[in-house]
Every structure is written in C-alpha cells, then in structure tokens.
Image: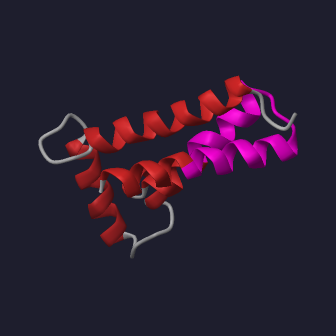
Amino acid sequence: MLLQSCHILNAALVSVIIAVIQWCMEDGMILYWYRKWLERKAFEWHYSAITKPMGLCSFCMTFWIAFPVAVFSLGLYPVQIITFTALSMFFDKLRVQTLN
C-alpha cells in the first residue's frame, strides 16, 4: 500500500496546521506582525523566493512543512514522501478553493 490511512490523516493535519498559521497572520491576529515583516522583507529582497515558503504563500509553505514531516517524523520512503507531500498540498489547495 502506498500510504496508510494514518499518513493520509497526517497529510490533512499538516494542511490544517498551515491553515491555522495563515489565519493567525490575518489583520489583527497574533501573527499579524510576522506577515507584515515578511511583506516588508519581500519588498526589500526584491520579492525573493524565500519569503513565500516562510509564510506568504500557503501552498509553498505546505510543501516545506510536509516534506520534513514525511522524512523525519514519519520516516517514509521516497515514493511515499512525494505522495505525502503532494497530498498535503492537495488538501491545502482544496481548503483555499473551498473557503475563498
């Protein structure tokens, strides 16, 4: 079996964690200052590719959270890592498309 049901649940949980971080970065929330700092750094760094995975893009951030979870926490094999990461990104995209 490519992924077990617990891995699918973990992929959904990664997406939920990213959603909570993104919601906490909205105006007036606890991580509002972090989003403002990222936006300022994105401008200073000429829209550097590093600011998106740091939080300006939930899809990019999902990859960089899901990948270490798959490798270090779950100990998956290469094909499973790709599938887990893709599934996490799918859940994030599904969340964004559904709620917006």
Q: Nearer the viewer, residue 4 or 82?
A: 4
Residue extending farthest left: 28
* x 86%, y 44%: residue: 78
Q: Is residue 66 magenta?
A: yes
Residue 14 at x, y = what percent? Answer: 53, 35
Q: Nearer the viewer, residue 20 or 50?
A: 20
Q: Which residues are magenta?
A: 64-90
Identify whether 17 is placed above or below 56. above
Residue 70 at x, y = what percent? Answer: 71, 35
Residue extending farthest bottom: 46
**Quadrant housing the N terminus:** top right
Specify whether 39 is left or right of 90.
left
* x 50%, y 40%: residue: 15
Q: Is residue 63 magenta?
A: no
Residue 39 at x, y = what percent? Answer: 29, 61
Identify whether 24 is placed above or below 72. below
Q: How many numbered discs, if any?
A: 0
Specify whether 46 is left or right of 67.
left
